Image (cartoon, rainbow, N blue to C red):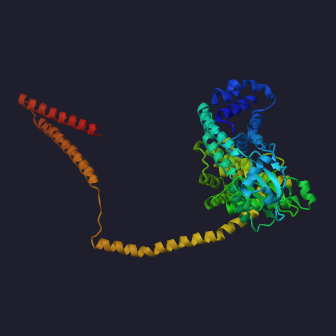
Amino acid sequence: MVPPVRRYEQIAGILVKHGFEVFVRDLLPGTVEWRLHWKHEVDIHGMDTNMRIRLALQELGPTFIKLGQIMSTRREILPPGLVEELTKLTDRVEPLPFEKVKPVIEDRCGLISETFKHVDEKPIAAASLSQVHLAELMDGTRVVLKVQRPGIREVIETDVGILEGIAERAEKAFPGLAVYNLPGLVREFARQIRRELDFVSDGKNADLLARNLEGVEGVRVPRIYWRYSCERLLVMEYIQGVRIDDVEAIRKMGYDPKVIAVRGFKAYLKQIFEDGFFHGDPHPGNLVVTTEGDIVFLDFGLMGIFRPERRDVMLRMLVALEDKDVDGLMKTFQQVGIRVREPLMDPFKDDVYLMLLEGESFNPEQPGTSVFQGLTTLLNKYRIRVPLVMMLMLKVMIQMQDDGLLLYPEFNFMKETRPYLGEILTKRMLSQETVRKTTLGLADALQSLAEVPQSINETLKMLSGGTVRFKVAHDDLDRIGGAIDRATYRLLIGIVVASIVVGLSLVVFATHDILSADVFRLTLVGYGAAVVIGIYSLYRLVRHR
């Protein structure tokens, strides 16, 4: 395991090597001077920034490769060019010698010679987290051994800690990045990659997906052999086939690529809108077509989850897209946590409506005409953040569209969805869950209705018997009394002042002769007293307020 300080130096060196020394100087101070001599080891001339980011992540190793792969789903916040580069990231690496992974297998299964009839020491695939070996159980069953690389957990934990520190410093150093919520993205990534390191979770995902797809024609999920599996070793059924994007091979096996495309499409719609548990990484390498024409799902580390209430919202979103109902679409956005700032709402709705109109005349040769591609483009344009599971669903939809177009060029997502939409809505309305909820709701309503006459009768008895009491807090009475006293005091002062002024005025107007000195002084005193009392009352009033 590389110590954290040494790993910081490695990361800084690779970033400088690919032309990101400014970034390193701000986020990894103290390391850039040591590694500046690496700068010219890679010819970065003619490479755009997005390509250099991809190459740097590739060289930084498994944690950063996985980060790039997961970030490629965040089409709503990353520029399209960067997303395109990140989708090219592969974690195919040089395999470890069999002697290094053999202890992982024997730690769970015992001696290989006692558990397996044969194990191929040369792996059929090698990734950054694991490598895959073909084997045969004692009863002749052919299986696949997915073996975790020794020490990979420690490497990833070190890198995740470094990434968390970099994300926090990046937000402070570059305030413009705050819109991306980098610490939040790193936390999401850390949860995901830790799940992928748990092969037991991987196997459980496969079992659940297999149960959900049981009875669906032409779809298979490999069986997990739990007797031999653990957190670092997954033993599953070996199913031979060709990649789903190998159109010629599919034709040679005697199958119509269009039938395969529609079959896979319907399987994904069922996962998302009926089961609420869907395979989150449908790139062609994870979908295999067998000689029987079945589609086999592989790699169950990245899965999406939609609870029943979210599935209902997703269905309403699909209906709104189909009906070009922009207001309905905005409501579903709010329900799933997509917030559009009020000043941007009108232009955003205009663009969404235009996107829906353009999607009506879908042209596979015209880029970006897929409804879901158009939607992610708009989310990116307006910098609207989307929950991870929603972006995962959008990524799956886009990949389904791409896979369908590879198999037959006329594939149109919305057109294929229409007949399914009515079917799934009918199923949801008539499902046991919906009937049970409706029945329970009706029972509660009837119970409440039945209790109304009794409640009214009891209320009337209390009123007629004089047993109804109204409680008023003592403090409230004191406040009310004080307010009344103050109002009465002000009114009394006003009446006294007015009486003095009016009385003296009547005396003055009633006297036709010139006022004597005594009467004149008395009148002045009276008016002066009225003025003083008025000013004092006004002062008290202003001070109280």
* Residue 8 percent across, percent down from the top left: 67, 33
* Residue 203 percent across, percent down from the top left: 71, 58
Q: Is residue 90 above or below residue 267?
A: above
User: Image point 78% across, 44% down: which residue?
Assistant: 90
Nearest the camera: 214 or 143?
A: 143
User: Image point 80% across, 67% down: which residue?
Assistant: 217
Q: Quadrant of residue 154?
A: top right
* Residue 273 percent across, percent down from the top left: 69, 61
Quadrant containing the C terminus in the rendered view: top left
Apparent side of residue 445 relative to residue 14 in the rendered image (left or right): left
Name of the residue lying farthest toward the right: 252
Nearest the camera: 130 or 103?
A: 103
Does the image show residue 397? no
Q: Quadrant of residue 270?
A: bottom right
User: Image point 52% across, 74% down: which residue?
Assistant: 443
* Residue 255 percent across, percent down from the top left: 89, 61
Q: Is residue 10 above or below residue 419?
A: above
Q: Is residue 95 above or below residue 472?
A: above
Nearest the camera: 329 or 522?
A: 329
Quadrant containing the N terminus in the rendered view: top right
Apparent side of residue 447 relative to residue 327 in the rendered image (left or right): left
Q: Quadrant of residue 145?
A: bottom right
Does the image show residue 54? yes
Nearest the camera: 145 or 119?
A: 119
User: Image point 64% across, 71% down: which residue?
Assistant: 432
